[in-house]
Image (tube, helix red, strand yellow):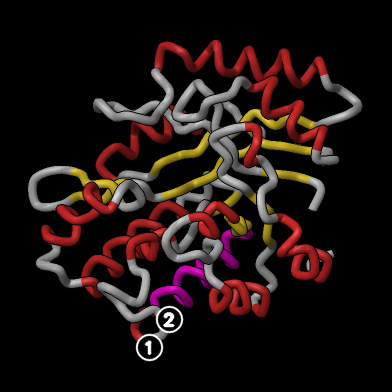
Amino acid sequence: MSGDFHMHTRFSDGSGTVDDMARAALKRGLTEIAITDHMPLPFINRYAIDAGQLMRYRQEIEEVRQKYSGRLRVNLGLEIEYIAEFRPWIESLVRQGWDYLLVSIHHLPGRERLHLVNGTAGEFAPLLEDFDNDGRALCHRYYGTLQEAISTGWFDTVGHLDVLKKHNRDFTFFDETSFWYRSLVSETLEIISRQGVKIEINTAGLGHPPREQYPGSMILREAAAKNIEFVLSSDSHSADTLGQYFDKFSALMHNQR
């Protein structure tokens, strides 16, 4: 409960500075944060750090770390977006040295181009269409990609594990209680457990259409049974949402101690 391990600043698609986020964390009584802006991407996009700003990003985090030394631990982090075809690009970023690396799936390849998994409903629709509206096939691709990412051994934590449900309210395109889906999740959790990777409880989902954290309660129970560790993450894009909804998970986090 003392840390927030997923947040974005104006270096990517957030609205605040690194210092804004640090001051908000102190105000909430936190003792540790990880700044995890979206990694640079080798194609035009609307949210990632510009590659030319990466050095300045690192410098600013170091400056804030020194400023609040003894009061707040500020981790130099990055949210890595795993896209298999860009694996060498990703590895070059990973090898630059970080305190904390979060791995997430944001894009999946369609027939002719990449589509956002967790963007707007309008951005998600073409992805599902490219899978012939077959939610099961899309889930297999998503979790298969996530499993490949985790198996690299590069990462500390898995970000918004079941974010594929963002536009699946009322089970619009797949049944989250079905045997095949739960099997995919179980396979993924087994890999997470073997790799010793953590799972974030991403509270931003409570403000998204599912009105539930990522991952959902079913997955959290299974992960806990496998002794997988959790970290709390707000996925904040502004200082005012840092640490949002953390109080809802106090009992769960207490039991991990």
Q: In terms of secondary structure, where does tag 2 sit?
A: helix
Tag 1, which secondary structure? helix
* Location of mark 2 (residue): 182
Instruction: Indicate yes or no whether the magenta region holds residue 183.
Output: yes
Residue 33, percent from left and from top: 72, 37
**Residue at x 34% of width, y 84% of height:** 180
The answer for how far apart the CA atoms under marks 2 and 1 are is 5 Å
Residue visible at 52% across and 31% down? Answer: 37
Seen as rendered, the residue at the extreme bottom is 179
Position of residue 44 relative to residue 229, above or below, is: above
Left or right of residue 15: residue 83: left
- Position of the C terminus by quadrant: bottom right
Q: What stretch is highlighted in magenta?
A: 182-197
Q: Decide: is 22 above or below 205.
A: above
Q: Which amino acid does label 1 sit on?
A: Phe
Instruction: Assess whether mark 1 and mark 2 are in contact (beta carbons under 8 angstroms).
Output: yes
Q: Main secondary structure of the magenta part?
A: helix
